[in-house]
């Protein structure tokens, strides 16, 4: 328990650190939301200044940070000037879409990677193993953006999948099953793009971990006892391969979150990606900070989940923590 | 030591055992085969201890794995108590090899780090579907005590034991299925002298009680001479020499064990 308490404490400090840094970095960035307004000859300098005063933008940095923290504690995370609404609910609505996308991609990528790794490890050195190694190497060389554009091209050329967005027109009139189908239909391309991006690394790491576990002398000992293949896999090999895979799981959460911001923009998925891009372009800095803090929160939560899984899976970590 | 090589009935016989490992360099490289065993013939008698010595790469461990049924020999036969194990269909072969158990060199990696001592010793019984859970627990605790570990430590995991204790646990696990032959694959290497002699004493005691047969694979000529009924020297996958320990003095046997490159067959 002390181990998990320590990890939780680390996470809170990390979150606080990222908050302070993103606030400071946004402050250092040139320009603000009112720059465009200042360029507009029909808006007087006094008007701009009065709006700046109204929203407290003219206050010194520590005061603004203090006000932002107070607002974050109430769940608002400041006020967006371009959306004219509190940032918390705005970011949360988008974050749910991003979470849906990344969760589906994570589940699918792992559901493909682990069985593939187990199978190719069983076929070590055979043509299936080498074909998988060659395929994943080739896929590693292709940038995510190219995969996304290729899939978009497929959608446009064939019309098999929607080429953007999250739901069809008239989504609200559909039944529950109809809504689920429509959503799944729109998920296919962005999830595929994310999965294809992350899959090569996952397969290669999982293959290495399973391959190494299968070479362990205790696996040989179990074989000498006449163990059945399924029991060997689930009782010995996979638990032994679990540690590097769980650590990798934590990394994929971060990777997928980063990759999804790009894929969302390219494929028109209404998640955090487009919101962040628009906020940066509009210099709506509190939204940028809000998205950064939310993303960090997911990342930290992913890491905390990884640490908890490692703690549950590995008796050595439990023994060290005691 | 009294030799029982020929006085007791034969337990196991290997006939022209051969094994090659397919290797490949890089993704598109040509395959080649490394011959680990080339026509190995020998027999081992019930209740005896045979030492197999040889340099790294001489085929000792490949022989151990083939004899324990973990790997299948490419050619040749393995007979155990008059039964040809190599003729048994693959699906039932591992079960037939159960009378042969292995104890490995690295006790830290040969015991599943996630299991408790009791689970480690009971695992072969679970695999065998032997008795109820409480029967298995009782037998596991008995075995743990038999190898000289306090049964109170049964809930500890391998890394909480010393190297010698772990090797005792590995022996307890090997004993669980009441084997006839135990292959000690460098099982005493890496232990300090005192621990090693304690484990040898334990193995001798178990041999006297249960009539066990040992095949002791080792680098240590001195130990092979002191604790065996017969010393077999392997070189390049072949048996180079067999003699009683009293005759296997260092100047005769060891120069012949000098490393020679493995025969390599290109193609295949």
Image (cartoon, coloured by chain):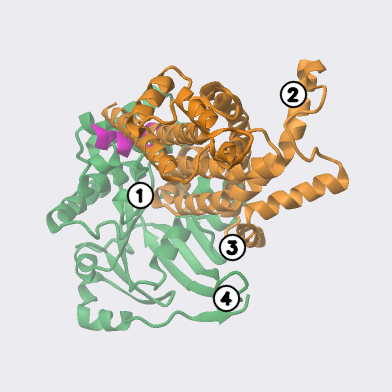
Q: Is residue B137 left or right of residue B193?
A: right
Q: Residues within 10 Å of mark 3 (few under 14, many from 20)?
A: some
The residue that disc 1 covers is B110
Q: Position of residue B201 (x, y in %)?
A: 18, 51
Disc 4 and disc 1: Cα gap in Å? 30 Å
In this rendering, the answer to whether A263 lies above or below B68 is above
Q: Which residues are magenta?
A: A311-322
Closer to the camera in the image, A106 or B103 = A106
Disc 4 and disc 2: Cα gap in Å? 54 Å
Disc 3 and disc 2: Cα gap in Å? 42 Å
Looking at the image, which residue is at 38% across and 61% down? Answer: B44
The residue that disc 2 covers is A180
Q: Chain of mark 2?
A: A
The chain displayed orange equals A
The residue that disc 3 covers is A125
The label nearer to you, 3 versus 1, is 3
Q: Is residue A194 left or right of residue B83?
A: right
Q: Residues within 10 Å of mark 2 (few under 14, many from 20)?
A: some
Q: Position of residue B230 (x, y in %)?
A: 29, 67
């Amino acid at each position: 328990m002390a181990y998990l308490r320590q990890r939780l404490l680390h996470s809170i400090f990390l979150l606080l650190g990222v908050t302070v840094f993103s606030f400071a970095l946004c402050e250092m960035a040139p320009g603000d939301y009112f720059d465009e307004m200042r360029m507009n000859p029909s808006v007087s300098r006094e008007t701009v200044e009065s709006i700046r005063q109204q929203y407290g933008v003219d206050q010194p940095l520590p005061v603004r940070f203090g006000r932002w923290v107070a607002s974050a504690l109430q769940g608002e995370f400041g006020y967006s000037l371009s959306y004219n609404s509190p940032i918390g609910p705005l970011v949360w609505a988008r974050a749910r879409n991003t979470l849906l996308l990344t969760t589906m991609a994570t589940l699918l990528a792992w559901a493909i990677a682990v069985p593939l790794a187990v199978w190719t490890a069983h076929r070590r050195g055979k043509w299936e193993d080498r074909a998988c190694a060659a395929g994943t190497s080739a896929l590693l060389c292709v940038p995510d953006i190219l995969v996304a554009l290729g899939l978009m091209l497929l959608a446009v050329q064939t019309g098999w999948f929607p080429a953007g967005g999250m739901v069809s027109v008239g989504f609200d009139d559909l039944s529950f099953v109809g809504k689920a189908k429509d959503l799944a239909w729109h998920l296919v391309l962005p999830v595929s793009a994310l999965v294809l991006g992350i899959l090569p690394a996952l397969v290669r790491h999982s293959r290495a971990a399973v391959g190494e576990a299968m070479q362990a002398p205790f696996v040989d000992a179990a074989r000498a006892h006449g163990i059945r293949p399924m029991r060997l896999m689930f009782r010995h090999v996979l638990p032994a391969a679990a540690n590097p895979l769980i650590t990798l799981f934590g990394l994929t959460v971060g990777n997928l979150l980063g990759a999804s911001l790009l894929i969302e923009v390219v494929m028109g998925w209404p998640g955090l990606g487009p919101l962040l891009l628009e906020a940066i372009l509009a210099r709506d800095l509190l939204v940028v900070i809000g998205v950064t803090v939310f993303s960090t929160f997911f990342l930290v939560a992913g890491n905390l989940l990884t640490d908890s899984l490692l703690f549950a899976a590995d008796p050595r970590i439990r023994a060290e923590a005691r | 030591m009294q030799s029982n090589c020929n006085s007791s009935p034969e337990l196991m016989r290997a006939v022209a055992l051969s094994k090659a490992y397919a290797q490949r360099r890089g993704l598109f490289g040509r395959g080649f085969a490394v011959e680990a065993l080339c026509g190995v013939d020998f027999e081992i008698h019930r209740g005896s201890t045979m030492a197999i010595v040889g340099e790294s790469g001489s085929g000792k461990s490949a022989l151990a794995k083939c004899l324990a049924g973990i790997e299948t020999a490419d050619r040749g036969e393995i007979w155990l108590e008059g039964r040809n194990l190599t003729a048994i269909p693959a699906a039932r072969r591992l079960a037939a090899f159960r009378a042969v158990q292995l104890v490995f060199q690295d006790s830290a990696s040969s015991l599943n780090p996630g299991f408790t001592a009791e689970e480690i010793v009971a695992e072969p019984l679970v695999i065998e579907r032997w008795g109820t859970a409480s029967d298995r627990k009782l037998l596991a605790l008995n075995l743990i005590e038999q190898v000289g570990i306090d049964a109170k430590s049964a809930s500890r995991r391998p890394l909480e034991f010393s190297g010698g204790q772990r090797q005792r646990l590995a022996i307890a696990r090997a004993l669980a299925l009441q084997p006839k032959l135990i292959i000690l694959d460098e099982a005493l290497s890496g232990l300090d002298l005192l621990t090693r002699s304690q484990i040898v004493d334990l193995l001798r005691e178990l041999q006297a009680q249960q009539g066990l047969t040992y095949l002791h694979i080792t680098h240590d000529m001195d130990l092979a001479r002191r604790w065996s009924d017969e010393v077999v020297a392997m070189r390049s996958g072949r048996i180079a020499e067999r003699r009683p320990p009293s005759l296997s003095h260092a100047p005769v046997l060891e120069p012949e064990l000098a490393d020679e490159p493995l025969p390599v067959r290109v193609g295949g």
